[in-house]
Amino acid sequence: MVTAEAVAGPFTHPALFYRNDEDYLAGTLPFVLDGLHAAEPVAVAVPGAALRLLRTALGRDGERVRFLDMTEAGRNPGRIIPAVLRDFADRHPGGRVRIIGEPIWAGRTAAEYGACVQHEALINLAFLGRAVTILCPYDTGGLDADALADAWLTHPVIIENGQERPSHDYAPQRAIAAHNEPLPPPAGIAAFSFDADRLPVAREFAVTAGERLGLTGQRLGDLALAVAELTTNSVVHGAGRGTVRVWARAGQVLCQVEDGGRLSDPLAGRRPAPPGQIGGRGLLMVHQVADLVRVHTGPNGTTIRFHLGR
């Protein structure tokens, strides 16, 4: 179970290591019921099977919990902070909020995994100082040793077998940097160079390529929107120019925009825009429409790659 120490202080972010359904319920059920008893808003965003398990165990008490299937709401890990965690917490600003969030499960692709680790690390920055507890379950039977080691990097507290231990490996900035990996495109993919005068042509280039690769309807519109936002950001923030590439892989269409700018804010695109703010929503919108977004930034420039299922 989660002890009182794990939910003390302004923001807490424990990881729960579990082996089976019994372990899962022993760690999550008291966390939810204690929150409900304290009249704290509670949300549960976990994969479908775990969602059904916990909902069944809660019975009528589950009527007071917000449930989200993380395989849908968090398919793109970059969408979880603004659209799941912050969305719920911001709706309840008066006191402590409790959330169970399970973004990493067996079956995540290698490309998704790096984004998941960065997401878990960035939670610590996004909620610093707020009265929020986010409990993150990790399946020790289904996940490999690297995933469990990364949990020690991204969570200050680990709970296993009912025991709570501080993480001596806790280093979220190191986890973010470790997955800030170069994103070289496949050989032979044509690149379209653009500047301020060629922004409409860059979008047309990408949409034509996406249509040729099988995107239609809303997915083609998502491509057009994302490309427009990223290429505009390149002109405004990335030395005034950039390149765009589009290709297909494993049933998805991938688009990549590169420029000479450096992304200095690690939470860019993961922070909800304040009401009434003009601009500042470009990367946030890309995260909303894409199935996955990967970013590499450094002294030589920034590359943003997004995936769209066909």
Image (spheres, rainbow, N blue to C red):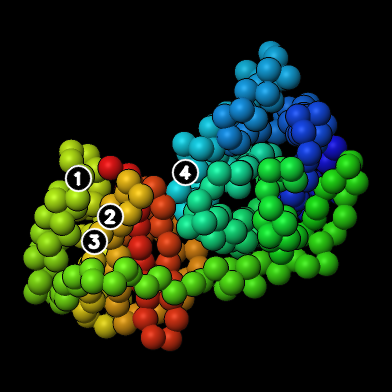
* Amino acid residing under circle 2: Ala
Q: Earlier in the sequence, mark 1 or mark 3?
A: 1
Which residue in the protein does label 1 denote? 214
State the residue position of label 3.
246
- Observer-side mark, 4 or 1, equals 1
Classify mark 3: helix, strand or loop.
Answer: strand
Amino acid type of the residue that numbered disc 1 sits on in the rendered structure = Gly
Q: Residue at x 50, y 68 (%)?
A: 266
Instruction: Identify the image quadrant of the C terminus.
Output: top left
Q: Position of residue 127 (x, y in %)?
A: 62, 55
In the rendered image of this protein, does residue 129 appear above or below residue 55? Answer: below
Quarter of the figure with residue 52: top right
Precedes in sequence: disc 2 or disc 4:
4
| Residue under pointer 2 | 248
Q: Earlier in the sequence, mark 2 or mark 1?
A: 1
Residue with the most extreme bottom position = 299
Q: Residues within 10 Å of mark 3 (few under 14, many from 20)?
A: many
Compared across the picture, whether 310 is left or right of 209 comes to: right
Real-space CA distance between mark 3 and mark 2, rounded to the nearest whole angstrom: 7 Å
* Residue wearing tag 4: 75
Q: Marks 1 and 2: in contact by CB < 8 Å?
A: yes
The answer to whether the residue labelled 3 contacts the one labelled 2, judged by CB atoms less than 8 Å apart, is no
Depth check, mark 3 against mark 2: the one in front is: 2
Mark 4 crowd level (few <14, some 14–19, many ≥20, 10 Å Cα): some
Residue 281 point in image, percent of width and height: 34, 57
Whether residue 255 is situated above or below residue 67 in the rendered picture: below
**Quadrant where the image shows the N terminus:** top right
